Image (cartoon, helix red, strand yellow):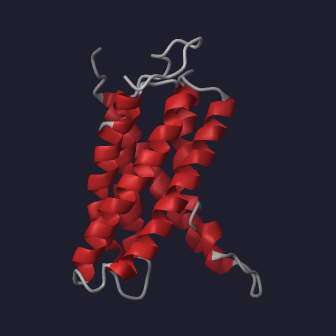
C-alpha cells in the first residue's frame, strides 16, 4: 500500500476547516436573542460534530462511507469530543497541586487527546471496517500529541482566538493522521479483528 501524499494534506485542511466551523458556531451563540440559553454541555459536542460531519463527508464523496456511516461517525466524534473535554475540565482542577498552569494544561490536553482519540478510534473500527491498529495507531498518537497545544486557549486576552487556534491545530493534526485508514480492508462478512 502506498500513501497518496495529497490525502494527509486534504484531510488536514478539512480538519482545520472543521475547527474553524466549530469555533464559528460556538461564537454565533453569543448572537442569539437575550434569554436564549445554550448549555455548556451542548456546546461541548460542537467541535466533534463539525469534525465528524466534514471528514465523514469526504469519505462519503470518495465512496468509502454510506450516509449511515457518516451519521454514525459524526455522532461518535461528537461524543468522543464531549467525553475528552469533560475529562479535561475535571482533571485540570485535580492537577492544580501537581503542576503550574500551562504545564497543567499540556498534561491535561495530552490525556484528553488520548481519551478522545481512543474513543473515536474504537468507533471507527466497526463504522469504516478498518483494523484496530489502523484506527488506534497514528490517530491516537496524533490526537494525544496535538493535545499538548491546549495552552493556546489562553493566548489572547478578551476574545476567544486561542480556542480557534486550538480547534484548528488539534482537529487538523488528527484529521491528517487519518490518511492511513483504509476503509473496507476488513471483508464485510467478517467482524473487525484486533490483530
Position of residue 73 relative to residue 181, above or below, is below
Q: Position of residue 159 (x, y in %)?
A: 43, 82
Residue 16: in sight, yes or no?
no
Quadrant including the C terminus: top left
How many numbered discs, if any?
0
Quadrant of the rendered image containing residue 7 = top left
- Name the one closer to the observer, 142 or 36: 142
Q: Position of residue 143 (x, y in %)?
A: 34, 50
Q: Residue at x 42, y 46 (%)?
A: 118
Position of residue 43 relative to residue 185, above or below, is below
Q: Position of residue 76 (x, y in %)?
A: 58, 46
Position of residue 179 relative to residue 37, above or below, is above
Q: Residue at x 54, y 19 (%)?
A: 191
Residue 94: in sight, yes or no?
yes
Q: Residue at x 36, y 87 (%)?
A: 157
Quadrant including the N terminus: top left
Position of residue 80 relative to residue 101, above or below, is above
- Name the one closer to the observer, 18 or 147: 147
Q: Position of residue 109 (x, y in %)?
A: 33, 65
- Name the one closer to the observer, 99 or 144: 99
Horizontal side, residue 192 vs residue 65: left or right: left
Quadrant of the rendered image containing residue 66 = top right
Amino acid at each position: 500500500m502506498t500513501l497518496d501524499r495529497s490525502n494527509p494534506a486534504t484531510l488536514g485542511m478539512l480538519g482545520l476547516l472543521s475547527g474553524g466551523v466549530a469555533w464559528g458556531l460556538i461564537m454565533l451563540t453569543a448572537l442569539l436573542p437575550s434569554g436564549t440559553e445554550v448549555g455548556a454541555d451542548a456546546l461541548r459536542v460542537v467541535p466533534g460534530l463539525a469534525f465528524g460531519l466534514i471528514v465523514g463527508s469526504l469519505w462519503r464523496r470518495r465512496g468509502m462511507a454510506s450516509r449511515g456511516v457518516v451519521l454514525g461517525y459524526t455522532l461518535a466524534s461528537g461524543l468522543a469530543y464531549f467525553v475528552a473535554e469533560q475529562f479535561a475540565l475535571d482533571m485540570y482542577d485535580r492537577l492544580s497541586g501537581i503542576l503550574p498552569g500551562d504545564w497543567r494544561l499540556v498534561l491535561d490536553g495530552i490525556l484528553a487527546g488520548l481519551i478522545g482519540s481512543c474513543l473515536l478510534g474504537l468507533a471507527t473500527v466497526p463504522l469504516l471496517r478498518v483494523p484496530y491498529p489502523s484506527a488506534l495507531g497514528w490517530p491516537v498518537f496524533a490526537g494525544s500529541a496535538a493535545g499538548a497545544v491546549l495552552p493556546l486557549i489562553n493566548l489572547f486576552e478578551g476574545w476567544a482566538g486561542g480556542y480557534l487556534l486550538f480547534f484548528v491545530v488539534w482537529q487538523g493534526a488528527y484529521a491528517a493522521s487519518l490518511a492511513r485508514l483504509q476503509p473496507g480492508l476488513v471483508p464485510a462478512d467478517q467482524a473487525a479483528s484486533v490483530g
